[in-house]
Image: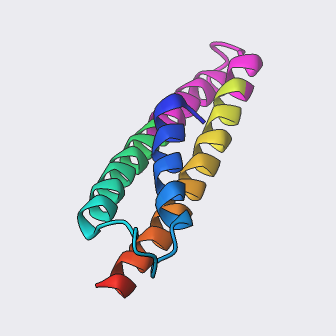
Amino acid sequence: MGGRLDIVMERVRELLEIPADARRAPSRDRIESTLTEGYAEALALDGERLRLARQIDQITARLARGEENHPEELRRLMARTEATEQDLARLRALLATLRNRAVRAA
């Protein structure tokens, strides 16, 4: 995970740790603001995943044409893609939980 993603996920976790029925339950505005921030980060991760996929496609096309052979670069891009997909899945799961909590509180 990257710095910005870590911050967003920590903010979501902090909100989820506060009991919904507690006197200090987070405000709807705070939850919605955090959800918006989280969705923006999810879009950024999805964009990164698409950029990585394009790079992988370009390398494999060059390999297929016999132009270049960069297996290390391909392995690196595939590992980054997998890590990005895992980060995106974790973030989406946290956001879904927070969104459900916001809906129940409404």
Secondary structure mostly seen in the magenta stretch: helix
Closer to the camera in the image, 18 or 9:
18
Span colored in magenta: 50-75
For the C terminus, the quadrant is bottom left
Taking the view exactly as shown, the residue that stands out farthest to the front is 23
Q: In this view, does 98 lie above or below 103?
A: above
* Residue at 64% across, 50% down: 86
Left or right: where does residue 29 sit relative to residue 35? left
Residue 44, horizontal then vertical, whole percent: 39, 41
Closer to the camera in the image, 7 or 84:
7
Q: Is 72 contained in the magenta span? A: yes
Left or right: where does residue 78 sit relative to residue 54? right
Closer to the camera in the image, 40 or 26:
26
Which quadrant of the figure has residue 32? bottom left
Which quadrant of the figure has residue 31? bottom left
Q: Is residue 82 above or below residue 97?
A: above
Residue 68, horizontal then vertical, whole percent: 66, 13
For the N terminus, the quadrant is top right
Residue 30, horizontal then vertical, whole percent: 29, 59
* Residue at 51% across, 67% down: 18
Q: Is 64 contained in the magenta span? A: yes
Number of on-image labels: 0
Closer to the camera in the image, 31 or 56:
31
* Residue at 72% across, 15% down: 69
* Residue at 27% across, 56% down: 33
What is the image's colouring?
rainbow
Taking the view exactly as shown, the residue that stands out farthest to the left is 29
